[in-house]
Image (tube, rainbow, N blue to C red):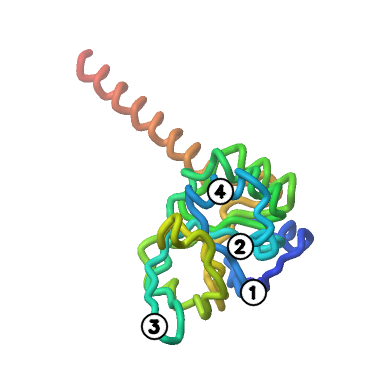
């Protein structure tokens, strides 16, 4: 388990390899579809200070509010491929060192990770309440009234947030590897089935 403290340097991120288990601590920002579109419409200097050398988390949280302020109740990852049209530009424009989500992303994002020294951190789905325990503070929230709770940009402090590197800054993607292996197994099964059918016909 490698402990990473945000903000991250490009040198630290480029040391990471797919398969590395990490513990993340520091300030990150949540963002889904509306947030990514908004970030690219114009330079958002008010958020840029939190995104530089940090991570964007594909997450639509469940939050509660009390006299003490906001707190996260659930913080599970959202499927990341939805942000493929936007992610490369957000990484470039805001100096991100990575993305947290689930399911991986496509070739455009993979190329951006390699070009700008960033990584994709896969968070386990189905553990939303457990992952919320890693959120120690809500520092700020942007576009809450406009987008609503799930789509707003939540600036949060996390401590010991667990994830696995599944896309690194060297052009490697576990998601591509698994898909290619799955396709090969499917081809082999199909060929085997055809062989059995041919033998029966003979």
- Residue extending furthest front? 145
Q: Residue 83, image x and y in percent? A: 51, 45
- Give the CA separation, mark 3 to mark 2: 37 Å
Label 1 secondary element? strand
Q: Are marks 1 and 3 in contact (CB under 8 Å)?
A: no
Circle number at residue 38:
4
The answer to whether residue 45 is above or below residue 138 is: above
Q: Residue 25, image x and y in percent? A: 61, 75
- Give the CA separation, mark 4 to mark 2: 32 Å
Q: Earlier in the sequence, mark 1 or mark 3?
A: 1
Q: Nearer the viewer, mark 1 or mark 3?
A: 3
Label 2 secondary element? loop
Residue that label 3 marks: 66
Residue that label 2 marks: 20
Residue that label 1 marks: 3
Pointer 4 local density, CA inside 10 Å: few below 14, some 14–19, many at least 20: few
- Residue extending furthest right? 11
Q: Earlier in the sequence, mark 2 or mark 1?
A: 1
Q: What residue lies at 22% left-to-right and 13% top-to-bottom?
A: 202
Q: Residue 28, image x and y in percent? A: 59, 66
Residue 149 as seen in the image, left or right of residue 43 = left
Q: What residue lies at 39% left-to-right and 83% top-to-bottom?
A: 66
The answer to whether residue 196 is above or below residue 145 is: above
């Amino acid at each position: 388990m490698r402990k990473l403290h945000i903000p991250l340097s490009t040198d630290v991120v480029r040391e990471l390899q797919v398969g590395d288990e990490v513990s993340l601590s520091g300030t990150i920002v949540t963002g889904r579809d509306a947030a990514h579109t908004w970030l690219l419409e114009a330079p958002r200097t008010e958020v840029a200070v939190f995104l530089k050398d940090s991570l964007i988390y594909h997450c639509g949280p469940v939050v509660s509010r009390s006299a003490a302020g906001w707190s996260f109740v659930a913080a599970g990852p959202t499927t990341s491929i939805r942000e493929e049209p936007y992610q490369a530009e957000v990484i470039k424009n805001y100096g991100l060192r990575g993305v947290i989500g689930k399911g991986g992303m496509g070739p455009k994002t993979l190329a951006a990770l390699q070009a700008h020294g960033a990584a994709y951190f896969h968070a386990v789905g189905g553990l939303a309440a457990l992952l919320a325990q890693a959120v120690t503070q809500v520092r700020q929230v942007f576009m809450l009234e406009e987008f609503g709770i799930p789509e707003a940009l939540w600036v949060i402090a996390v401590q010991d947030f667990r994830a696995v590197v599944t896309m690194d800054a060297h052009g490697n993607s576990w998601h591509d590897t698994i898909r290619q292996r799955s396709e090969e197994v499917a081809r082999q099964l199909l060929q085997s089935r055809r062989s059995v059918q041919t033998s029966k016909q003979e």
